[in-house]
Amino acid sequence: MPGHVISEVGHVSLRVRDLAAAEEFATNVLGLLVSERSTDTLWLTHGGPHHTLSYTRADEDALDHVGLVAPDAEALAEVYKRVDSAGLRIVSDKPLDPAVSDGFAFADPDGFVYAVYSRMARSKVASPTSGLRPRRLGHFNFFVSDPRRTERMLAEIGDFRISDRMLDGVFLRCNVDHHGIGVFPGAGRIHHVAWEYPSMIEVAAVADLVDARGESVLWGPLRHGMGRNIATYVLEPSGLVQEFYCDMERIYDDAGHVPGEWSPEGHKWVSLWGPHLTPDGFTELGLPPASRG
Ligand SMILES: [Fe+2]
């Protein structure tokens, strides 16, 4: 089949204990817009798609699912076929979200649920505010018990390609962005979700906003070695880390790209500009996959 079967990371759906705090943070700090709400769920967008983030009131803070976008119905059908023949568990034969009119969802061996679809309605948010708003949802990072297994699954099911490695950690891409998904060794969690802003000016402005609220960012700004994005990280009320970044490496020579092998020695893999090392406890943050009965 021509082309790759996944073209974008689409959205992240969370379960949260404090829905009001989640909304306050996502709208006031990240600058997302409320696209639709029900009694217990809130769908937010950066603009364009109906939603790129959603929160559902629950008795746990957890990842419900992540969304992957197939470019068309043919690619979607191919992903379903591959998931099925890999023996992965189909969680739903129907879309999990409103405004999505095709697709299905499956669970991986770590319990992470992926919703795959090709058609999501556009957001009807009429008049965006003049505030800071991300350009797009860029990527998410998982910590899993066996990164090589997840890496193989993403390659086999979704045609993800390897951009860079550091020991068992890997960044995979599904389009020209250096990474759409990062997979690193650790206790099964989604560690962060990352939003692309136009430039370092907006990244600094979001950090200034965090400071003006009397809060602090967790880390950054720094320029990562792997991915070259200028990144800053902040903790949202649910316990998930949110990254805001700009200027990520893009890989246009898809077939010719040779994955980099980064050394864990020193700081270059994580911070090109200086010895700006990961803060204590940073890698223990994030949310586990939701419990499903
Ligand atoms: Fe990231």
Image (tube, rainbow, N blue to C red):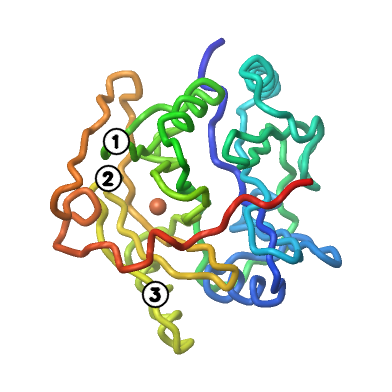
Mark 3 sits on what residue? 217
Residue type indicated by callout 1 = Asp
Image x and y of residue 145, in percent: 46, 41
Residue 1 falls in image quadrant: top right
- CA neighbours of label 3 inside 10 A, class few (<14), some (14 to 19), many (20+): some
Q: Is residue 237 above or below residue 173?
A: below
Mark 1 and mark 3 residues within 8 Å of each other at the beta carbon:
no
Q: Tag 2's secondary structure?
A: loop
Residue type indicated by callout 2 = Met
- CA neighbours of label 2 inside 10 A, class few (<14), some (14 to 19), many (20+): many
Mark 2 and mark 1 residues within 8 Å of each other at the beta carbon:
yes
Residue shown at 66%/20% (left/top)?
A: 87
Mark 1 sits on what residue? 164
Residue shown at 27%/49% (left/top)?
A: 228
Image x and y of residue 270, in percent: 25, 53
Residue type indicated by callout 3 = Val
Mark 2 sits on what residue? 226
For this view, does 20 lie left or right of residue 223? right
